Amino acid sequence: MFTFDHYRESADLLKARIGDFAPEVLLILGTGVGYLAEQVESPVFVPYGEVPHMPVSTAHSHVGRFVFGRLGGKDVMVMQGRVHVYEGYTAEQVAYPVRLAKLLGCHSMIVTNAAGAVNYNYRVGDIMLISDQIRLFDPDPLIGPNIPEFGGRWCDMSDVYTAEYRAIARQAACDMGLMLREGVYFYFTGPQFETPAEIRAARILGGDAIGMSTIFETIAATHCGMKILGFSLLTNMAAGMVKTAYVPGEVQQTAEMVKDRFCQLVTDCLSRLPAAAE
């Protein structure tokens, strides 16, 4: 388990790399959407493996580095790729960079992921604004000794995806002429894809999209007092919803198809986020 000293050691290394730069927003780029990091102005790159205690991405589609710079008029800390529990990491390790971002000054987080559509009204290529999340029976990044520098022992989860930020996203999508879905993200550990029966269960329980990430990061960010905006890029229909099975490479193909409007939406939302003191 990590102590506050572990996070401070990681933060010291990053501060030595970025100097006086103070990020405002953590941007986590999931499977297939790492291309947004290429739009960061005056970037400073720091591979995860060079940061003490930071887990390293093993998924082939995740570059595995921090990118510090300017995007959408905000000073950002971008994760170009993330880590997952299915890679063998604990929930606490998956959440590690979120607490690190808080220590560096981030007051908000935009989290993205590739997800399978569970809602029959959704289509491949749609973007879903995450309104809430469901996690059943799996580990939790807050289990173990509490680190008071990041938050109290008990963590309220009634407004994980900040209502104010969701309103900003709806308006940004409207201004773009983009149909933005809005729904509940349902977490499965992976790495195997879900069975048709599991997808039926997720739908009955209120899920609109399913994926293998995001949950632990949002729990840690909520505990830290960060405001959160989340998007799922719907890259495939979940098991049992169509006759064809998942095709390898489908996620990347869909992401490539919608990358321009996805980048525009996230960047526009960034530009509209209020400063920490507002």
Image: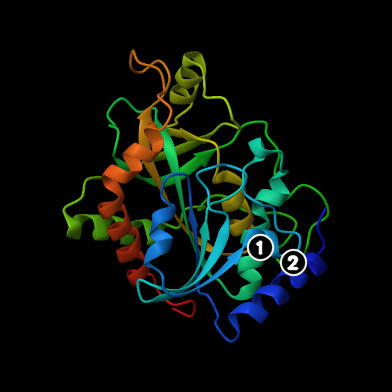
Q: Residue at x 50, y 35 (%)?
A: 211
Answer with the quarter of the image where residue 256 lies: top left
Q: Using the rendered image of the protein, determine whether residue 150 is visible from the camera's viewpoint.
A: yes
Residue under the point 16% across and 53% down? 177
Asked if 169 appears above or below 204 in the picture, the reply is: below
Q: Position of residue 82 (x, y in %)?
A: 57, 50
The residues tagged by marks 2 and 1 sit, at their Cα atoms, a distance apart of 7 Å
Within-10-Å neighbours for mark 1: few <14, some 14–19, many 20+: many
241 lies left or right of 84: left
Which residue corresponds to the image point at 36% horizontal and 30% vertical from the top-left? 236
- Rendered view: 132 above or below 19: above
Helix, strand or loop at disc 1?
helix
Residue 254 in which image quadrant: top left
Instruction: Pick the residue in front: 153 or 62.
Output: 62
Q: Nearer the viewer, residue 128 or 167?
A: 128
Against 32, residue 198 (above or below) is: above
Question: In which quadrant of the rendered image does the C terminus lie?
Answer: bottom left
Q: Indicate the position of residue 184 as horizontal and vertical percent values.
A: 43, 38
- Amino acid under disc 2: Tyr
Residue at label 2?
7
Q: Earlier in the sequence, mark 2 or mark 1?
A: 2
**Residue under pointer 1:** 99
Labels 2 & 1 near each other (Cβ < 8 A):
yes
Residue that sits furthest to the left in the current view: 177
Element type where label 2 sits in the image: helix
Residue 141 visible to an observer of this rendering: no
